Amino acid sequence: MILKEAIEQLKSGLAGVAEPQEVQAMIRVICEDVFNYDQVDVALRQESELPDFAQERIADLITRLRRHEPLQYVVGQALFHGHKFKVTPAVLIPRPETEQLVDLIIDENEGSDLRVLDMGTGSGCIAISLARALKFPQVDALDVSRDALEVARENAATLKVKVRFFESDMLAPQPAARYDIIVSNPPYVCWSEREAMEPNVKDYEPGQALFVPDNDPLLFYKAIAPYAAQSLERGGRLYLEINQRFGNEVKRLLEDCGFDEVRIIDDSFGNPRFAAATR
């Protein structure tokens, strides 16, 4: 099988799975991550022979994608903050909005040797990106899922950064330490919002990392905020990704916990997506 035939087979097999423009983007990812052809290679090597496994691999890809399995799980990795991270169904797929959260932290914290804690690290994308971008930080990260921590540790090793990982529940967080920055992208989607979500999210990504009860939408923030109020150094900063429906409620919670300079910050789509506060 040559590259041109593989691309045509993918186009045909994925027709109707997504909009044509999205299918083209999926094919670009497959060509790069599965067959090691970037966009220039694809343009110049249409007649190139693919490995013997190509036919079987393409059939498997099409089957899984037609079941709405996320492309990132199918190829086993996702791009975040300029680097490829391993992802499995044990971890959420990193989102562009969370890249904005990382950029906010980097832009606002230019000091050296900062102590950072990422609560609910998942794939480790936040912790690892901060470990790479800040100046000589000490980065800790916790998660309740052993499978997620295994993925995160592998990502840290692959990207050659030092992060200390801990198995701990955000609702009763450990370790007890002092930090300059605490960040979290906790579960914040209400169960009532689940049916409006795309199948590739609600049917495949880990529910424990996504959903909270309708009657307690601030469940994790009510644990994170007092922990951060006790664990942050004076002048330390807390950064949170939030449900856009509850920005005012998160702001009041942080103020009630004694935080100053509480801000609700819009994402690139104009939705209130982040909270930041100073102890």
Image (cartoon, grey):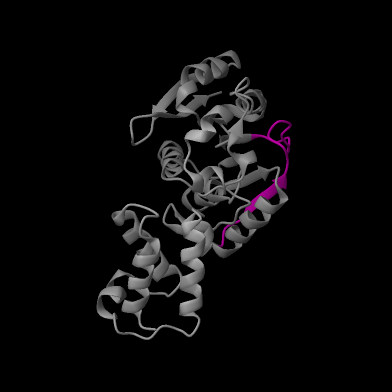
Identify which residue is drawn at 51% across, 77% down. Answer: 56
- Residue 262 within the magenta-colored segment of the rendering: no
Tell which of 226 and 230 is nearer to you: 226
**Residue 268 falls in image quadrant:** top left
Identify which residue is drawn at 46% across, 78% down. Answer: 55
Q: Is residue 107 above or below residue 223?
A: below
- Main secondary-structure element of the magenta-colored stretch: loop
Residue 134 rendering spot, x and y as whole percentages: 48, 47
Residue 158 rendering spot, x and y as whole percentages: 57, 64
Stretch in magenta: 160-178
Farthest residue to the left: give it: 44
Q: Which quadrant would the C terminus be assigned to in this image?
A: top right
Q: Is residue 112 above or below residue 251?
A: below
Residue 197 rendering spot, x and y as whole percentages: 48, 38
Tell which of 53 and 79 is nearer to you: 53
Q: Which quadrant would the N terminus be assigned to in this image?
A: bottom left
Report how many numbered discs are placed on residues in the image: 0
Is 143 on the left or on the right of 275, as rendered?
right
Identify which residue is drawn at 30% across, 84% down. Answer: 47
Residue 261 rendering spot, x and y as whole percentages: 46, 20
Is 168 on the left or on the right of 197, as rendered?
right
Residue 148 in view of the camera: yes
Residue 239 in view of the camera: no
Identify which residue is drawn at 62% across, 19% down. Answer: 215
Is 224 on the left or on the right of 39, as rendered?
right
- Residue 163 within the magenta-colored segment of the rendering: yes
